[in-house]
Amino acid sequence: MTSTAASPKNNVLRLAASQALMLSAIVMSMAVAGILGVQLAPDVGLATLPIAAMVVGVAVASLPAALLMRRIGRRAGFLFGATVGIGASLLAAYALQAQSFALFVLGHFLLGAYQGFANYYRFAAVEASDPAHASRAISLVVAGGIVAAFLGPQIGQWGRDWLPDQLFVGAYLIQATLSVAALFILAGLRLPAMAIAQKGAARPLGEIVRQPALIMSIFGASVGYSAMIMAMTATPLAMLGCGLPGTSVTPVIQWHVVGMFAPSFFTGDLVKRFGAPRIMQIGFVLLLSHVVIAVSGLEFLHFLSALILLGLGWNFAFIGGTALLTQTYRPAEQLKVQMVNEFIVFGLVAVASLSAGWLYARFGWVLLNLSMVPLLLVALVAAMRMAGANRPALCAT
């Protein structure tokens, strides 16, 4: 059992720092794994499989991570996840040395499992804060990703030729050190024991999941995240396919990640002021704006501006959805609701990621982006109806 001696601020800062390190590792892989996949994969349509495997790892790990943390606590679970992250990076580095596509994919699957554990950082921040500051705690932890916007792609550049004749092996070795640093930061967490955090009576899961607010939060977060990951996964391939130099990929991914996380410094306050459904609406409008820009041209500025809008849209949709989710369950219900949310959201995100390489290879960049529009429109209308009706159907605590 963990102590509650540390202040909420100390816990949130440690979680935000750990989030920054974890996402730097993820962003580095997002920037280079697709390019390396072209070299290692037996078919170009499988080039994005390492990235897809990473997202599948998130979905697969989400349920075991929650169950393990119920038994051993948040802190111990987070430490276990960071250890998996270390092993994942080392395996990916070895796979590049051995020119093994299968091991490279497995390494990214395990890297996704690390993220599956780390995705509970935002919920741990809520548990360590008072309810009035829940949305701000979520935003601050997610905002740790702003570091990843600069550190992640830079690691790829630093480690690209670090070892002679071993392209990007050094980058994955540096990536492993990020997980080691996260391990030490997480060791200082002092979070409420799970038994304390889950006090009170719980309703049947069937009753909980029928709440309109919970359905909206999961659906909205799934659509927003899936649209983001599909476009982001295919972007490096699309840019290279359009004849743009490989060096142009890094700034596009970098500013995309800035768009994903920079608004987090104030998104929580916006949720508190205007309500989660309205913030989610803004997210879906921004994601639709990404599609408009993405299909209007294939120059560097088209990719750059489209990916910035993609990041901004993800931020509003995902943080709005997470904030709405935290208002739909009682303390005793939090773990099972979080498990359902993570499994559904990242299961659908995994499908989107797996589809990205195939859609791009078969139909191209424009049709890949247009395929997002129907679900984005449905999500936008659903969020508008919820905000207009002003009936979040939140549970009493």
Image: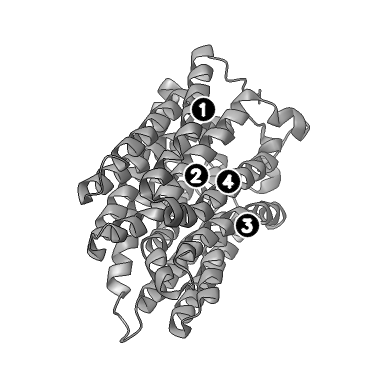
Pointer 1 local density, CA inside 10 Å: few below 14, some 14–19, many at least 20: some
What is the x, y in percent for residue 354?
A: 53, 55
* Label 2 secondary element: helix
Task: Please indicate whether residue 281 sits to the left or right of residue 5 in the image.
Answer: left
Position of residue 370 relative to residue 146, above or below, is above
Q: CA distance from mark 3 to mark 1?
A: 29 Å
* Label 4 secondary element: helix
Which residue matches tag 3? 61
First of labels 3, 1 by sequence position? 3
What is the x, y in percent for residue 195?
A: 71, 45
Which residue matches tag 2? 226
Q: Nearer the viewer, mark 3 or mark 2?
A: 2
Q: CA distance from mark 4 to mark 3?
A: 14 Å
Q: Which quarter of the rendered picture does the N terminus lie within? A: bottom right
First of labels 4, 3 by sequence position? 3
Q: Which residue: 41% across, 44% down?
A: 367
Q: Are marks 3 and 1 in contact (CB under 8 Å)?
A: no
Circle 1: residue type? Val
Position of residue 262 relative to residue 271, above or below, is below
Which residue matches tag 4? 348
| Numbered label attached to residue 378 | 1
The quarter of the picture where residue 128 lies is: top right
Pointer 4 local density, CA inside 10 Å: few below 14, some 14–19, many at least 20: many
Q: CA distance from mark 1 to mark 4?
A: 16 Å
Circle 4: residue type? Leu
What is the x, y in percent for residue 377?
A: 47, 28
First of labels 3, 2 by sequence position? 3
Q: Nearer the viewer, mark 3 or mark 1?
A: 1
First of labels 1, 2 by sequence position? 2
